[in-house]
Amino acid sequence: MRALFIGAGSPAIVFGLVPLANALRSGGHEVFMAANEPMMPSVSGNGIPAVSMAEHDIWHYVWTDRNGNPRTFVKGFEEEMRFTGGWFAHLGAEGYATLRGFTGQWRPDIVVGGTMCYAAPLIAARLGVPYVRVAWDSGDWRWTDEGALPVLEPELRELGLDRIPEPDLRIEIYPPSLTPPDAFPDAQLMRWTPGNLQRKAEPWMYSRPERPRVCLTAGSRASRERSLEFLRGLAERIAPLDVEIVIPAPEELASELRRVLPGVRTGWLPLDVVVPTCDLVVHHAGGATTMTAMSAGVPQLVVSETLAFLPPVRRLADYGAAISLAPDDATDEAVATACRELLSEPSYRERAGALARELAELPPPSEFVPQLEKLAAR
């Protein structure tokens, strides 16, 4: 069987697809993963053959429409979701154009795409092969298709379609206790496993320190421009609690963090190695970060950087495994108080542990391989 995986824009999306892609490769199947050019190291670094389907980085598609005009950010939950769907669709349309040529040389039997990786349903419809949609986080992205639809109208018209094709198989990764209120009734749950890039492990990364350890991160897309002040401010608020702070970050940002926060351990630190040694994860509400902490049974303090991330964070907080703060509410006192509560109140770790056990009981990616084989053989 030949399987074409399609990611888009962010390392987190690639990482979310890696476990299932590797399960297929381990089963003897041919696999390629397509994404935009800046994501090629994230794909190939996980040992998966990589295909570049679009030239630009994520921000080109966020801030520029298909005609080259600037896009203006909108406020409000539904508006932000449509905006997000629009830029994902722009990237998807460019990727679809490239993949038409690629699949003329290497025709897949099945197409597997991440949430909002719109090139996947388009190329699957063109080829007449099954399409599988795999969630890469526990977010609620229902409104994004409304923003994507007008952007993809030329491609849909060419295919004789008036809507974005539905998947033949929909795979979600949330634990049952955090099922969204409007969850897809036909979705199948898969165990979430990390697919992040690795580096040489040092003993401190997999050993627990004497003091409580707090992991502070703004995700794999963190940069000096977007994240330095966010991380610096949170680190300075947390430092008086007498904890050890580690900050996983891309190296370009990490070099600046070492300068402004002497003594803090930072750099590209694989979350799946470091997080299990932590007592608390403080982050921006990124999907991969949230799921890594959840699977490790570690409480979370979430300062959401966007409204789109709020629903799953609120469910996590309502369950009792996290505290969520809006950016405007993340004052020195509020952050310090929340961290003290999360570190000292056992119920948070107990609830986080319960979610970790739920995730561990879900079927792993390898158990979906026979199902994909049957789909491809139809």
Image: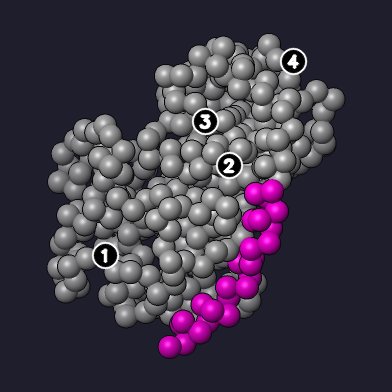
* Left or right, 145 with reference to 346: left
- The CA span between labels 2 and 4 is 28 Å
The residue identified by callout 4 is 242
Residue depicted at x 50% and y 14%? 331
The residue identified by callout 3 is 324
Q: Main secondary structure of the magenta part?
A: helix
The residue identified by callout 1 is 164
The residue identified by callout 2 is 319
User: Tag 1 or tag 4, which sits nearer the N-term?
Assistant: 1
- Residue 274 position, x and y percent, is 71, 38
Identity of the amino acid at label 4?
Asp
Q: In which quarter of the image is residue 268?
A: top right
Residue depicted at x 42% and y 19%? 328
Is residue 126 something that shows in the picture?
Answer: yes
Q: Quick one: label 4, few (<14), some, or many (20+) residues within 10 Å? A: few
Q: Which colour scheme is used?
A: one colour
- Residue 219 position, x and y percent, is 53, 36
**Nearer the camera: disc 3 or disc 2:** 2
Identity of the amino acid at label 3?
Ser
